[in-house]
Image (tube, rainbow, N blue to C red):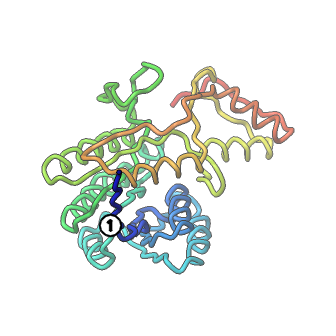
Amino acid sequence: RIIISLTFYPAKNLFMNVVVTGAAGFIGFSVTRRLLERGDTVSGIDNLNDYYDVRLKQDRLEQLSAFADFRFTRLDIADREAVQSFFRETAPQRVLHLAAQAGVRYAMKNPYAYVDSNLVGFVNILEACRHNGIEHLVYASSSSVYGANTQMPFSVHHNVDHPLSLYGATKKANELMAHTYSSLYGLPTTGIRFFTVYGPKGRPDMAPYIFTESILKGKPIPIYGDGSARRDFTYIKDLISGVIAGMENPSPFDVFNLASSSPIDLLSFIRIIENITGHRAKLIFGKRY
């Protein structure tokens, strides 16, 4: 005779209270919307800087404001006291840190924007997480950390000590700082290295938008090198799934690549846009970075 004993436990509340930094940005907006659609409570922050047209950011926020469980606060993560106060008020369980000064070439014009947001701001987020009992911090890193590395395909086990841009250097620094806080204070952190992300309401400074607009308007496209450089593109919906999966599975410290693993060369990418638009691109070769 077999006796089976069953013990019933109350259902675990799967909904979470999440802070998303950079909520008005392309990736921040997209991830926030997915969280809200599934029932999470999201407190979003963004400084709404003018790196690109602020109207696009405001349009994203307008869509998010339709959700009752969304709260937005305009806040600069470089403001230490404001960040700490925000975390105390919202008492989040988990944090998706997606705010950063983006772009590689813009650093040549305004390097301090990267220092303020990507370095000072990141430390402020780490400190806020440490002092407010955050269960898990997920933050955006970048494929730019690979820099001069030529070993393909990229692996998180490769050496990334030679970034070729200030942006890449700040993202490498973020990974090092996160590791330190995980080691010293037991803060679970997960860094996700984004590759070229595209999709609806994407950033207008990214190649898909710049090239498409140039082709449609008959403007020449400068090609750096011979056009054989390869780039890995990630569709936003795939990236969202990866980011949320990372958030739901905390570990003491991790760094992941999130990409399609199917890089495409620049000229082939342009040919695809030509086929879709029915227009030919005007290319200027020999440009240098």
Q: Which residue extends farthest left?
A: 184
State the SS at label 1: loop
Q: Is residue 213 above or below residue 76?
A: above
Task: Judge the density around disc 1: few (<14), some (14-19), many (≥20) Cα neighbours within 10 Å.
Answer: some
Please state which amino acid type lies under the numbered disc 1.
Answer: Gln
224, above or below 78, in the image: above
The residue identified by callout 1 is 93
Residue 230 location, quadrant: top right
Q: Residue furthest front?
A: 1
- Front in this rendered view, residue 29 or 93: 93
How many labels were placed on the picture?
1
Horizontal placement of 18 versus 59: left or right?
Answer: left
Q: Position of residue 43 (x, y in %)?
A: 42, 72
Residue sitting nearer the eye, 170 or 8 = 8
Quadrant housing residue 160:
top left
**Left or right, 271 with reference to 190:** right
Q: Position of residue 197 (x, y in %)?
A: 56, 45
**Horizontal and vertical percent position of residue 125:** 28, 61
Residue located at (61% from left, 23% from top) = 286
Outermost residue toward the right in this view: 278
192 over 160 or under it: above or below = below
- Residue lying at 45% horizontally and 50% vertically, measured from the top left: 245
Residue 208 falls left or right of residue 6? right
**Image location of residue 17, percent across then percent down:** 39, 70
Q: What residue appears at the point 66 percent right and 24 percent down from the top-left corner?
A: 285
Report the side of 282 relative to 257 (left or right). Answer: right
Q: Nearer the viewer, residue 263 or 108?
A: 263
